[in-house]
Amino acid sequence: MKHVKLGELEVARIGLGAMGMSHGYTDSGTDETESIATLHRALELGVTLIDTAEIYGPYTNEELLGRALKGRRDQVVLATKFGMIAHAGAGPWNLDSSPANIRTAVEGSLKRLDTDHIDLYYQHRVDPAVPIEDTVGALAELVAQGKIGHIGLSEAGPDTIRRAHAVHPVTAVQSEYSLWTRGLEQRVLPLLRELGIGLVPFAPLGHGFLTGTIRSTDGFTEGDFRHGNPRFTGDNFQRNLRIADEVEAVAAEAGATPAQVALAWSLAQGDDIVPIPGTKRVHRVEENTAADDLRLTDEQLGRLSGLPPAAGDTHTEAGLQMLER
């Protein structure tokens, strides 16, 4: 697989998001054997960037990766995230990016991941109660100590990114970005390119929607991220099916799957972009990584880029409150 750079960090240009192996979707965490097989197959196919977070589970996703990557750690650029668990106070789903909480969080992640260093350590969501300079200052100390290699931000806005980068180089910003989530193109992506920061899109397949396999929301339980998500409900869902249908039409022309087309579109947006499609299935990781070889025509890319915006917000109102734009 082709390699590119996120800042100064070299990675294969398609990564793997591990969240769904134990968190966020209806069937998450039901088959650890298959999840581990998927991680191992991804490495065989040349994937290097593997992404997790302490909040996934909480904790169980990092523990899964610790078991799965034993004896394979040197093949992986390992990324995890902190800041959505207040370790000394309110617990999970409460923002805390204070230096004290970061020091607690990193030790827990290192232990669960069974490693002595984390290659890319992200602030999961910007904490409005803690100046970003204080957060990045604490992370810079971890870099100096060798506990983390590179600093990342997730769903941060332009002002936060610029202020963070002034304290210590930011290697990557993780944000939702795909054919149907393109809001960062106006303000965030130009800044990343100005500063030499890479973009790591999560949900590049639209939480499964762009694969063309979701034609109904009947199977989503309350534990599924998509249950109650504005894009997956009511009239919005029906309108968004037109986007999936167009992706499927391009896939038929290209002799590829809709998922491969959606990923190929992401890859065509620049060599500083490394999508991390999530899966817990071996055949899906094989399908996704094959997008590395797919080259869409200019006409096909133009049709995809010209699709109308998705109907509905990317998150519920509570989720939107944690995002910077």
Image: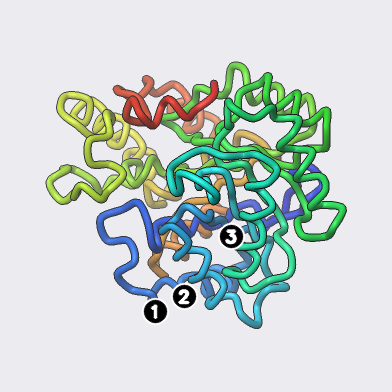
Residue 94 screen position, x and y as percent? 46, 40
Q: Residue at x 27, y 28 (%)?
A: 230
- Depth check: 287 or 123 in front? 123
Residues at discs 2 and 1 in contact (Cβ within 8 Å): yes
Give the residue number, with chain letter if any, for mark 2.
36
Q: Is residue 24 left or right of residue 177?
A: left
- N-terminal of the two: label 2 or label 3? 2
Q: Residues within 10 Å of mark 3 (few under 14, many from 20)?
A: many
Q: Residues within 10 Å of mark 1 (few under 14, many from 20)?
A: few
Task: Name which quarter of the figure residue 227 lies in.
Answer: top left
Give the residue number, with chain letter if any, for mark 3.
50
- Which residue is farthest front? 89
Task: Find numbered disc 1 in the image and state the secondary structure of the residue it sits on.
Answer: helix
Q: Is residue 86 above or below residue 17?
A: above
How far, Cα to Cα, is label 2 from label 1? 5 Å
Task: Find numbered disc 3 in the image and state the secondary structure of the residue it sits on.
Answer: strand
- Depth check: 265 or 29 in front? 29
- N-terminal of the two: label 3 or label 1? 1
Is residue 18 in view from this perspective? yes
Q: Residues within 10 Å of mark 2 (few under 14, many from 20)?
A: many
Q: Is residue 313 left or right of residue 190?
A: left
Task: Find numbered disc 2 in the image and state the secondary structure of the residue it sits on.
Answer: helix
Residue 317 screen position, x and y as percent? 33, 25
Give the residue number, with chain letter if any, for mark 1.
33
Q: Residue at x 74, y 35 (%)?
A: 197
Looking at the rendered image, the quarter that the C terminus falls into is top right
How far, Cα to Cα, is label 2 from label 3? 12 Å
Say what amino acid the circle numbered 2 marks: Ile
Q: Residue at x 23, y 46 (%)?
A: 214
Q: Residue at x 36, y 44 (%)?
A: 207
Q: Is residue 284 above or below residue 269?
A: below
